[in-house]
Amino acid sequence: MHVMLDTAIFLGKFLYYFLESLTFKIIPKSKKNIAGEIVLITGAGSGLGRLLAINFASTGASLVLWDINQEGNMETCRMAKEKGAVKVFTYKCDCSNRQEVYRVADQVRKEVGDVTILVNNAGIVTGKLFLDIPDHMVEKSFYVNVISHFWTYKAFLPAMIKANHGHLVCISSAAGLVGINGLSDYSASKFAAFGLAESLFFELNMIIKCDIKTTIVCPYFISTGMFEGCTTKYSFLLPLLNQEYVAQKIFTAILEEQVYLLIPKFAYFALVLKQMISPKMMIVLAEYLGVNTCMNSFKGRVKKNELPNETEEKSQ
């Protein structure tokens, strides 16, 4: 009897939320007002992080910009102010360093206040075949792309839970859903970032039962310097994404409190298909989409006095 009642309750709730989800697909959710929020963006000194800061600039939110590149971070600050931001705070922070994250987080709390929207955007890519990746770059990929998320969550989540208010944003990747050759360390770290963010989503909703929102973003290759040289075989299925377009989609997803955002929409179909077809069929599909060759001409963003493919860019 208990099983029948439990099943009936489950089916009722499942149907209700299915219809709710369907309704929101037809009639988008109203966008929340984030004026007065404190938004922290890691890897804000260039690329996607900079564009996200610009999108938040005119909302009335206070911006906290973290990047290891202080010069780039100051340029983002200037651009955000030009777009209407009034309160912008910049901090130099190596997100891969736990002690530095905690130290700068304490500084932010004292000088700005409790962060209410945390955007974990900082990331790096090596773009080498597995056996060609230097050991230190494997470690660096994990420290920047996922382990840093542990430190920022631990630094800012307690205040969000206490206030029963906040929003966690994880910039993962399509490579965090499907492994891509030439990106083994990047894919592995982005899989981990996705898993961490999704685990927290369930923990916050099912165990702690608080009103903290979660948004997990998985875009295909973005046309920033980070993925310079990457190619796509059929752009109508898997286009190289315009960074302004991606930033706007992420910004909208945050305001609409979407939990998952996959870009482009073909990624949703590919993810479902992955679970249904055989491994050999997956290889055939990957070859058709050009996944086997997409990293052949990868260059990445090269800094001065660095060799290609050894960039340590701190923003997506």
Image (spheres, helix red, strand yellow):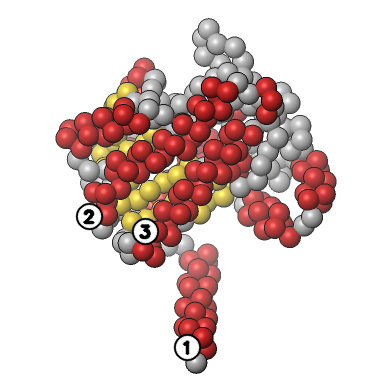
Q: Which mark is residue 162?
A: 2
- Of the image marks 2 and 1, the number of the one nearer the N terminus: 1
Vertical placement of 284 versus 45: above or below? below
Vertical placement of 306 versus 272: above or below? above
**In the current view of this chain or complex, which residue is farthest to the left?**
110
Q: Nearer the viewer, mark 1 or mark 3?
A: 1
Residue 300 seen anywhere in this rendered image of the structure: no
Residue 148 position, x and y percent, is 41, 35
- Of the image marks 1 and 3, the number of the one nearer the N terminus: 1
- Of the image marks 2 and 3, the number of the one nearer the N terminus: 2
Residue at image point 50% right, 68% down: 21
Q: Nearer the viewer, residue 268 or 149?
A: 149
Q: Nearer the viewer, residue 203 or 30?
A: 203
Question: What is the spatial separation of the Cα atoms under label 2 and label 1, in whole angstroms?
Answer: 35 Å
Corner quadrant of residue 53 = top left
Residue 290 seen anywhere in this rendered image of the structure: yes
Residue at image point 64% right, 50% down: 267
SS assignment at label 2: helix
**In the current view of this chain or complex, which residue is farthest to the bottom?**
1
Vertical placement of 252 versus 51: above or below? below
Q: Which residue is mark 3?
A: 204
SS assignment at label 1: helix
Vertical placement of 87 versus 45: above or below? below
**In the current view of this chain or complex, which residue is farthest to the top?**
305
SS assignment at label 3: helix
Residue 71 position, x and y percent, is 36, 17
Q: Which residue is mark 1?
A: 2
Question: What is the spatial separation of the Cα atoms under label 1 and label 3, in whole angstroms?
Answer: 27 Å
